[in-house]
Image (spheres, grey):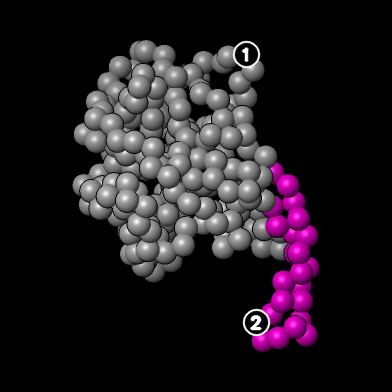
Amino acid sequence: MKVLAFDVKSSVAHFRRPDTTATQLTYPFIPPTAAKGLVGAILGIEDFTTTDKVGIELRSSVRLVSQQLSLLHNGGSSFNRPTTIQLLVEPAYRIYYAGEQFFNELEIALKEKQFVYTTYLGSAFAITTPVYAGTWELNEVLDTGKTYSARSVIPVSAIKELVPKDGHYYQRASGFMKRYEGHRTFSQSIDFIFEKSGKKMFMKPKLNQEEYQLVEIEGDLVCLV
């Protein structure tokens, strides 16, 4: 099994939670559906859907600020509505990608730096440029009794036991959409555990290959969803 990775970062990002209205809150890191959307933009595929899987590694601390804006109506400047938007500050992620549908095309595009559409982190004001990080041959994780260091965010359902460490702060992030079905429709939701400063987590895993895939990269665990 092969997994590739690419890095993205920006000065700000905003991944709007669909359950917010007047105040536009953001998820604390890029959702799996947005990570796959980046792949669609790189390859130039509109309304991108795939059964390929992604893993998300935080490579910076999760920092949030709120900013008040006045949004102008499309019909003209006579109408404006003040709103508060929550932003992620200086986010950086490593996106892992595995599967058979678009793996080869994505690897070539990243290596040759040939991107069809502009890539951004959730909103058009958060432009980013993907940087190829590498490709690995992997084995799946099978030992549920071993304590692993996890470099990616991990679904709650994949954790048998969290192992606390000094200076590590584990948090839960809920309500992510898991699958994009096309035509702006989504199915399933997923909750994650992450380390807020971007450090590795330590855990004993559960195995459920129908919901996620656990693999090892350079001795660390990565979860693909």
Q: Is residue 62 visible?
A: yes
Mark 2 is surrounded, within 10 Å at the Cα level, by few (under 14), some (14 to 19) or many (20 or more) other residues, namely few
- Residue hosting label 1: 166
Mark 1 is surrounded, within 10 Å at the Cα level, by few (under 14), some (14 to 19) or many (20 or more) other residues, namely few
Camera-side residue: 172 or 29? 29
Q: Quadrant of residue 123?
A: bottom right
Which amino acid type corresponds to the residue marked 1 in the rendered image? Asp
Q: Which callout, 1 or 2, points at the residue further toward the start of the chain?
A: 2
Q: For the magenta stretch, what is the residue range?
A: 64-86
Given the current orientation, which residue lies at the most extreme front position? 112
Q: Quadrant of residue 218?
A: top left
Q: Position of residue 16 (x, y in %)?
A: 59, 56
Of the numbered discs in the image, which one, if any, rests on residue 116?
Answer: none
Check the image and report above or below for 50 versus 210.
below
Q: Position of residue 119 (x, y in %)?
A: 47, 58
Q: Secondary structure at mark 2?
A: loop
- Looking at the rendering, in which quadrant would you find the C terminus? top left
Which amino acid type corresponds to the residue marked 2 in the rendered image? Asn
Question: Magenta includes 78?
Answer: yes
Of the numbered discs in the image, which one, if any, rests on residue 74?
Answer: 2
Q: Are marks 1 and 2 in contact (CB under 8 Å)?
A: no
